[in-house]
Image (cartoon, rainbow, N blue to C red):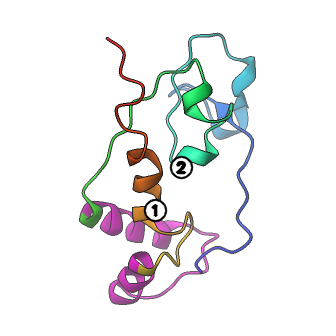
Amino acid sequence: MLVSNFSMPLLYARTRKTRRSDYIPLQATPSPRCLHTHMSYDMVPGGPPAQSPAKYIYLVRNPKDVAVSYYHFQRSLKLSDYHGDWNDFFEKFCEGEVTYNLWFDHILSWWKHKGAYIQI
């Protein structure tokens, strides 16, 4: 695994003008809020989305784009212990041996619930 013992941090909000040190707890921001996340369906704050008053828009990227972008992101992290090449990373990505595990499982966690919350 590229990152072991991964745990979800507290949720924080910021504006584009906010420095990282100025993050504030999400719960302290006024409603309505817009949250951008990479969380799987089961990890969304507030419990299962099916039982939440929140509205969700789920965007899916091409898995090839995700893998390339994730590879460059992982290599750019100063705290990352990953120093392998693209071929090694791609194999780990396809096997789910990266942070957040298997990308396809993540997509399926939301896909199973598609169409359940359509409101116009």
Residue 28 percent coordinates (x, y)? 75, 18
Label disc, if present, on residue 105 of the rendered structure: 1
- 90 vs 102, left or right, is left
Q: Is residue 100 above or below residue 109?
A: below
- 104 vs 46, left or right, is left
Q: Is residue 91 above or below residue 64?
A: below
Residue 43 percent coordinates (x, y)? 63, 46
What amino acid type should be assigned to the residue bearing mark 1? Answer: Asp
Q: Is residue 101 above or below residue 39?
A: below
Q: Quadrant of the N terminus?
A: bottom right
Q: Residue at x 60, y 69 (%)?
A: 78
Residue 8 percent coordinates (x, y)? 70, 52
Question: Which residue range is magenta in the image?
Answer: 65-94
Q: Is residue 70 above or below residue 46?
A: below
Q: Residue at x 38, y 37 (%)?
A: 58
Q: CA distance from mark 1 to mark 2?
A: 9 Å
36 or 14: nearer the viewer: 36
Contact (Cβ within 8 Å) of mark 1 with mark 2: yes
Q: What residue did someone put label 2 on? A: 40
Label disc, if present, on residue 28 of the rendered structure: none
What amino acid type should be assigned to the residue bearing mark 2? Answer: Ser
Residue 118: name its quadrant: top left
Q: Is residue 19 magenta?
A: no
